[in-house]
Amino acid sequence: GGTNKHPTNSSFVKLRVPSLETVWSKEVGSDIVGVEKWTPDNSDHMAISEDRYVLHTSGECYWGWCAGHQGDLYRVLNATTGEQMFQEQQDWQASHSCKQMITYSNASDTFMMANFGDYYPKDVVFNGFSK
C-alpha cells in the first residue's frame, strides 16, 4: 500500500541560451504519483510548443486505488511563466507504464503522447490535446 506521504516534487528549470541564466524554476508534481519515486532511464520526455512545455514521465502512486503501483503522468507548463496549466494535465493513463513518449505538431498545434503499459491496459495508449 501507499504511504500517504507526498514525495518530493521534481524541478523544471528554464534556462536562457547561451548564458544558461535561470529564467524560471518551478516544482512539478502530482497529488497521487511520486515522480521521483520510480523514474527509470529514459522515462522522461518533453515536447515544446510556442507557449507550452509538456513533460511526460512516470512515477509510483502513493495512496488510493493505485497505491504501490507505477503509472504515467504529464505536466503542462506555461512557457513564459512556468506556471502549471492544471486544466490540461493528467495523471495515470496506463498502469505499469513502461515507456512514455511525446511529440508536438506545429502544423496542427497538437501534442500527441504514446504510453506503453503492461497492465490495465496491456496496450499502447495514445492521447492528444491542443489549445
Image (cartoon, helix red, strand yellow):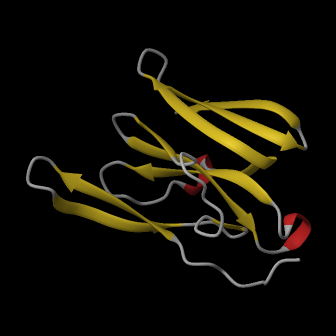
When asked about the image quadrant of residue 19, the answer is bottom left
Depicted 45 relative to depicted 108: above or below = below
- Given residues 8 and 31, the one toward you in this image is 8
Q: In the current view of this chain or complex, which residue is farthest to the top? A: 107
Q: Position of residue 55 (x, y in %)?
A: 51, 48
Depicted 92 relative to depicted 23: above or below = above
Residue at 58 percent of width and 35 percent of height: 101
- Given residues 71 and 129, the one toward you in this image is 71
Q: In the current view of this chain or complex, which residue is farthest to the front? A: 41
Q: Position of residue 61 (x, y in %)?
A: 76, 67
Residue at 15 percent of width and 56 percent of height: 20
- Given residues 23 and 80, the one toward you in this image is 23
Residue at 82 percent of width and 75 percent of height: 63
Q: Quadrant of the N terminus?
A: bottom right
Residue 74 left/right relative to 96: left
Residue at 33 percent of width and 34 percent of height: 50
Q: Position of residue 117 (x, y in %)?
A: 80, 40
Depicted 43 relative to depicted 4: above or below = above
Label count reads 0
Q: Position of residue 90 (x, y in %)?
A: 67, 51
Residue 131 left/right relative to 121: left
Residue 89 left/right relative to 11: right
